[in-house]
Amino acid sequence: MDKYAVFGNPIKHSKSPAIHKQFAESLGEQIDYRAILAPIDNFEKTVSSFFEQGGVGANVTMPFKEQAYAMADELTPLAKIVGAVNTLKKRDDGTITR
């Protein structure tokens, strides 16, 4: 089962896990999607640990969108213009993209 998460601080209010699980189920897929509270001073380590433990994709909310941008090994042209991202994906080769 693919593992996904939304990272933020605060994050308790997020409806992303329920929305994404419902969408996946409507497509006949099962996913593990969690809301993870990332410490303000430890976002990168928290996300890296998630990916090291088998996570394949992450949504990122405030205040971490610029830090997520800095984590990405590869960026889309639009992400380069904006200077922030709200999703990260781990590729099979271990690189992080947006």
Image (tube, helix red, strand yellow):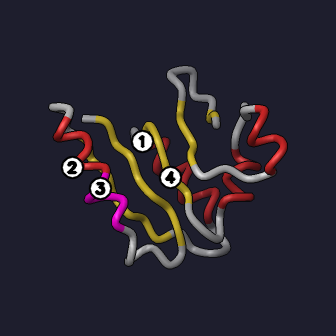
Q: Nearer the viewer, residue 31 or 28?
A: 28
Among numbered discs 2 and 1, the one appearing first in the sequence: 2
Residue at image mark 3: 19
Nearest to viewer (mark 3 / mark 1): 3
SS label for mark 2: helix
Amino acid carrying mark 3 in the image = Ile
- In this rendering, position of residue 36 left or right of residue 96: left
Q: Please report whichever mark, 2 or 4, sits nearer to the chain's N-terminal start.
A: 2
Kindly check if marks 3 and 2 are in contact, taking CB atoms under 8 A apart as contact. Answer: yes
The residue under label 4 is 59
Is 30 in the magenta? no
Residue 16 magenta-drawn?
Answer: yes
Q: Residue at x 38, y 77 (%)?
A: 12
Say above or below: 45 vs 15.
above
Q: Which residue is the site of mark 1?
A: 55
Mark whose residue sits in front, 2 or 1: 2
Residue 27 versus residue 58: which sits nearer the camera? 27
Tell me: residue 57, above or below residue 14: above
> Which callout, 3 or 1, points at the residue further toward the start of the chain?
3
User: Which of the two residues, 31 or 15, is positioned nearer the viewer here?
Assistant: 15
**Looking at numbered disc 2 in the image, what kind of residue is underneath it?**
Gln
Could you tell whether 85 is left or right of 22 in the image? Answer: right
Q: Which residue is mark 2?
A: 22
* Eye-nearest disc, 1 or 4: 4
Q: Residues within 10 Å of mark 2 (few under 14, many from 20)?
A: some
Q: Residue at x 67, y 73 (%)?
A: 41
Q: Which residues are magenta?
A: 15-19
- Amino acid type of the residue that numbered disc 4 sits on in the rendered structure: Asn
Dot 4, how many residues are within 10 Å of its Cα: few (below 14), some (14-19), or many (20+)? some
Instruction: Provide the secondary structure element on which disc 3 rests.
Output: helix
